[in-house]
Image (tube, rainbow, N blue to C red):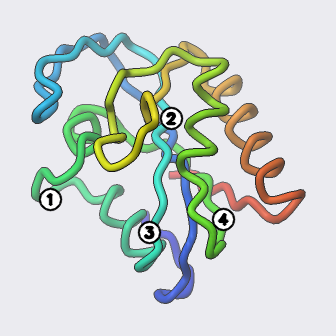
Amino acid sequence: MKVAIDSQARGSYILLIALPRRIRIEVGALGSLEFPQGFYAYCGSAMGGLAARINRHLRRNKKMQWHVDYLLEKGTVCKVLYAMTNERLECQLAKSLGHTFKLYPGFGASDCHCPSHLFFSKELPALQEKASEVFKWLLHGGEVIIEEC
């Protein structure tokens, strides 16, 4: 699957990732982390090409560059929520999701001061509903696109 949006589009996104079983993963400088079976939301922004960034995350074979790459090696992106905007929303999305869901300290947040950009839920509907709600609130009712993978 690939998202088909303008290659010049900028924006923010949330990957909803399914992990079929409990697993311990070595995540770069974060070390060995335990991930329970369930669903994960990863918040990101792409100010240099939203489609390219999301499509990179969806590819299986890639160089390990970001924390999320290690999780994606074992899990599967089941949905992508994104919005085309010139505003970098990933930290605001992460802060809001962190009030509701378990977070992984430092994950995806090495270039900001957020506690985390990765969140866990046992239930996909709860994670998707909250992620969509937060996105829409930050966009003041603007369009959030949800792609099934």
Asked if residue 118 lies left or right of residue 33, the reply is right
Residue type pointed to by label 4: Ala
Q: Which residue is mark 2?
A: 41
Q: Which residue is mark 1?
A: 62
Nearer to us of marks 3 and 2 is: 2
SS type, badge 2: strand
Q: Which residue is mark 3?
A: 2
Q: What's the residue at 66%, 18% (across, down)?
A: 100
Mark 3 vs 2, N-terminal side:
3
Give the camera-side residue of 78 and 104.
Answer: 104
Residue 83: mark: 4
Q: What's the residue at 36%, 11% (across, down)?
A: 36
Nearer to us of marks 1 and 3 is: 1
Badge 1 density bin: few <14, some 14–19, many ≥20, Cα 10 Å: few
Q: What's the residue at 44%, 69% (across, down)?
A: 2
In the picture, the quarter occupied by the N terminus is bottom left
SS type, badge 4: strand
Residue type pointed to by label 3: Lys
User: Cβ–Cβ below 8 Å for labels 1 and 3?
Assistant: no
Badge 2 density bin: few <14, some 14–19, many ≥20, Cα 10 Å: many
Residue type pointed to by label 1: Lys
Mark 2 vs 4, N-terminal side:
2
Badge 3 density bin: few <14, some 14–19, many ≥20, Cα 10 Å: some
Q: Whole-percent x and y of residue 75? A: 31, 33
User: Cβ–Cβ below 8 Å for labels 1 and 2?
Assistant: no
Q: CA distance from mark 1 to mark 2?
A: 20 Å
Q: CA distance from mark 3 to mark 4?
A: 16 Å
Mark 1 vs 3, N-terminal side:
3
Badge 4 density bin: few <14, some 14–19, many ≥20, Cα 10 Å: many
Nearer to us of marks 4 and 1 is: 4
